Amino acid sequence: MNIRKIREQLAGSALRPQRRFGQNFLHDWNLACWIVDCALRGLSSPWRIWEVGPGLGVLTKLLLGKGAEVRAVEIDRGLAAILRDRFQGEADFHLCEGDVLRAEWPEPTRDWVLIGNLPYSISGPFLASLFRHRTPFRRIVVTLQREVAERLVAAPRHSSFGSLSVMGQSFYRIEIRKRLPPSVFYPKPRIDSAVVWLEPLQAAPVSSEDREEFCGFVRRSFLHRRKCLGKSLGCQERRRPEELGVDEWVEIWQTLRG
Ligand code: SAM
């Protein structure tokens, strides 16, 4: 969908891009094809996709064209109406109108792929919730603001290293697959983006039952990132939160919980 078509689609429903919902629509067709390929490559069908914020349906259309089943969560009523109209008659398209931060994950009895050009305003809380819970996602391919993508893959002592890095890397293998300039979106955002690819670790160092507790511990510990951990946790640790690697975080958490 090029910029002219995006404008026409929105205008046809008396809509405008809503900044509060982070609406920057992808208009680079090749890039959309590349993102879909990145999400599906190497996975055998039937593909079940959970799409966050389908917008006007640029990724949805490609996914349905490949024979995937798509469940999409879209908060904007106007866009939801366009999507219903555009994909009516597609038996594999299921739309949930609402806030993805309140939505239930798809049922864990089957493997799902999560895909989405995430609205910038919710990417932090959304990812944190993803890491805190056991989810049915076999793979996750999301476009994020570049700064958040860099936090996800950062190593200890790097300025981007923080609680999101520890939580994410404790449960997922994470790679930045592509950096995107603002020009691939309409309207152009003020910042760069990146496509991030995540797959669950086969042997995560923290069990599914303990994820929430572990993530809570990490987040609380990073509230005072300049203080040595001994001061905030009441233990002997002299290093600051940003100096510990993922394995060391697991170790210190296990020691302190006894
Ligand atoms: N996927 C489309 C694309 O690539 O062109 C749109 C991406 S746009 C960056 C973000 C989309 O997420 C918009 O459609 C927006 O309305 C939707 N959105 C924003 N906040 C949301 C939320 N809390 N829950 C579900 N959808 C949301």
Image (spheres, helix red, strand yellow):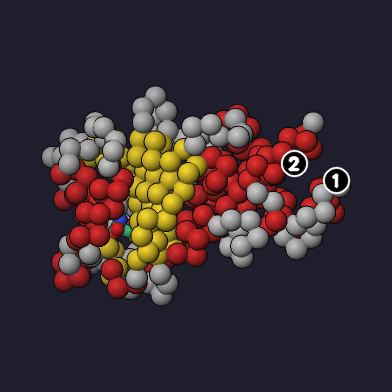
The residue carrying mark 2 is 252
Outermost residue on the left side: it is 89
Where on the picture, by quarter, is residue 185? Answer: bottom left
Mark 2 neighbour density, 10 Å: few (under 14) some (14–19) many (20 or more): some
Residue that appears at 26% across and 32% down:
44
Residue that appears at 25% across and 54% down:
34
**CB contact under 8 Å: marks 1 and 2:** yes
Query: Disc count in the image?
Result: 2
Outermost residue on the top side: it is 109
User: Percent from the top left, x then y, of residue 220?
Assistant: 71, 50
User: Percent from the top left, x then y, of residue 38?
Assistant: 30, 48
Residue that appears at 25% across and 48% down:
37
The residue carrying mark 1 is 235
Depth check: give the residue in front, 126 or 231: 231
User: Left of 25 or right of it: where is 145?
Assistant: right
User: Left of 41 or right of it: where is 159?
Assistant: right
Determine the CA span between mark 1 and mark 2: 9 Å
User: Percent from the top left, x then y, of residue 21?
Assistant: 40, 62
